[in-house]
Amino acid sequence: MTVTSERRTGVAGELRHVDKWYGEHHVLDDVSVRIGHGEIVALIGRSGSGKSTVLRVLAGLSTDHTGERVVTGPPALAFQEPRLFPWRDVRTNVGYGLTRSRLPAAERTARADRALADVGLGDRGTAWPLTLSGGQAQRVSLARALVAEPELLLLDEPFGALDALTRLTMRALLLTLWREHGFGVLLVTHDVDEAVALADRVLVLDEGRVSHELVVDDARRSPSDPSRNTERYRAVLLDELGVEL
């Protein structure tokens, strides 16, 4: 395995010809994935296809693989479950995203407060996680991921446990933060519509291999725009996933 660090180039994160085994199970088979700065890439596939393993390898959480991993600084992660510490207040939870830094305590607090303001929770710093709604908890999780100002954000089905309205709100928030900060994003999702709505490119993972890449030419245009090819993209991806309409 080779790990490189590339700063101020076009690459936020990349895997090159990565193979990974769990015992005799070939989980990832010659996987290459590239996320550019300011690009959103969605990764979809059936359960057990290896999506979360790709994310873990990019995050540096899994190291027993072959191939090359290229990252621009430490990646940040957010998961489907917020994974907040219930015994710590919201501000402290967000500040946990700065554990690798050597910032003074006052600066850590200031940055945590700015991150909370970015996600619309500037007044909830002293609240306890158990008092938050599901959407608020996920906002805190996103603030914790972004507080260190990463250049690569890794999202593992971050909105899957939310209700439909809150999910749409969180998608809009993610795009707002992405436009403001310009980080690269790898979004692991089971939701084809979400992938098409958010991504510049959608990769289909099938039995540990990238089997298809879809470029969304009109990425993030309004769904009401008649030039948007949402239904065509959706049909292509569902066909690649083996779903019959």
Image (tube, helix red, strand yellow):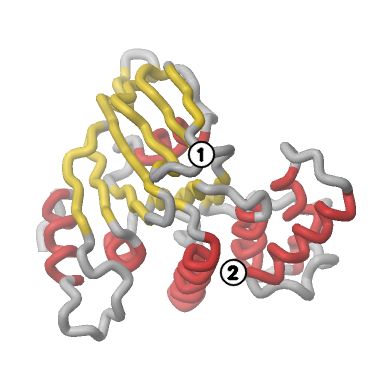
Q: Which residue reaches farthest front?
A: 8
Q: From this viewpoint, is residue 162 visible?
A: no
Among numbered discs 1 and 2, the one appearing first in the sequence? 1
Q: Secondary structure at mark 2?
A: helix
Q: How far apart are labels 1 and 2 at the CA level? A: 33 Å
Q: Which residue is pictured at 32% across the width and 38% down the height?
A: 33
Q: From this viewpoint, is residue 65 visible?
A: yes
Which residue is under mark 1? 7
Q: Residues within 10 Å of mark 2 (few under 14, many from 20)?
A: some
Q: Which residue is pictured at 14% across the width and 49% down the height?
A: 240
| Residue 147 drawn at (x, y percent) | 67, 54
| Residue 34 drawn at (x, y percent) | 34, 41
| Residue 105 drawn at (x, y percent) | 88, 49
Which residue is under mark 2? 135
Q: Residues within 10 Å of mark 1 (few under 14, many from 20)?
A: few
Check the image and report above or below for 56 versus 77.
Answer: above
Check the image and report above or below for 132 versus 182.
Answer: below
| Residue 127 drawn at (x, y percent) | 81, 67
Q: Which residue is pictured at 44% across the width and 51% down the height?
A: 184
The total of numbered circles placed on residues is: 2
Instruction: For the C terminus, give its image quadrant.
Output: bottom left
Q: Secondary structure at mark 1?
A: loop
Q: Does 153 sit left or right of 110 as displayed?
A: left
Check the image and report above or below for 2 versus 6.
Answer: above
In the figure, residue 128 lies in which quadrant?
bottom right
Q: Does 158 sit left or right of 145 as displayed?
A: left
Instruction: For the N terminus, give its image quadrant.
Output: top left
Q: Which amino acid type is marked by label 1?
A: Arg
Q: Which residue is pictured at 38% across the width and 23% down the height?
A: 68
Q: Nearer the viewer, residue 138 or 216?
A: 216
Check the image and report above or below for 159 versus 60.
Answer: below
Q: Which amino acid type is marked by label 2?
A: Gly
